[in-house]
Amino acid sequence: MNHVRMIDADADADADADSGLDALTKVFEVNVYDNLPNGNSNLITHCQSKDNDFGNHKLYLNQYQRWSFHQNIFKTTLYFCYFTWNGKHQTFDVFNKHLAGDCQTGVGGNVCSWIVKSDGFYFSPNRLTPAGPIGNLDKRYNWK
């Protein structure tokens, strides 16, 4: 499987690590997986936090973007993404303090996976496998 792999840390978490508090914070992983029909239009993602901007990424069918980070001690770490595909778009939080609880329930622990399909955006608390997402998917958002 082709993939884009990004490993970054939230700047707030970096400050905590410098003070020796990183052992008190959880490491989370976010995945954005392109499960759109193979065609002329590719998924474009632009994901960022207050401190980290990953820029635009073009994903092809079965590719994914991944990053991991320490949640800060105040549990205010937030990442959001803007998605565009085939004339449609959507923006939402892919990680925040409310999603953190959902991300802790699946296989692999502390994982937030977002599977992008032609009818919308699905959440899974499971780590991606070479065959793609595993387990039940929960539709959370539609395209606009």
Image (cartoon, rainbow, N blue to C red):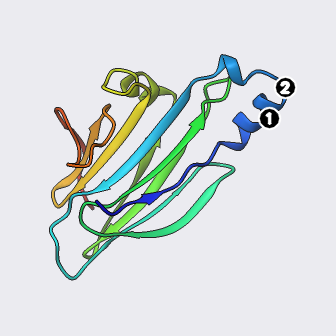
105 or 50: which is nearer to us?
105
Pointer 1: residues within 10 angstroms few (<14), some, or many (20+)?
few
Left or right, residue 115 beside residue 82: left
Residue 142: where, in percent of width, then height? 23, 52
- Identify residue type, mark 1: Ala
Image label count: 2
Residue at the extreme top: 24
Can you say whether 18 is above or below 51 in the image?
above
Q: Mark 1 highlights which residue?
A: 15
Q: Quadrant of the N terminus?
A: bottom left
Q: Quadrant of residue 35?
A: bottom left
Q: Mark 2 highlights which residue?
A: 19
Left or right, residue 113 beside residue 119: right
Residue 94: where, in percent of width, then height? 43, 44
- Residue at the image point whose x is 46% and y is 55% from the top: 81
- Identify residue type, mark 2: Ser
97 or 144: which is nearer to us?
97
Residue 112: where, in percent of width, then height? 39, 37
Cβ atoms at labels 1 and 2 below 8 Å apart:
yes
Residue 87: where, in percent of width, then height? 27, 76
- Residue at the image point whose x is 31% and y is 54% from the top: 33
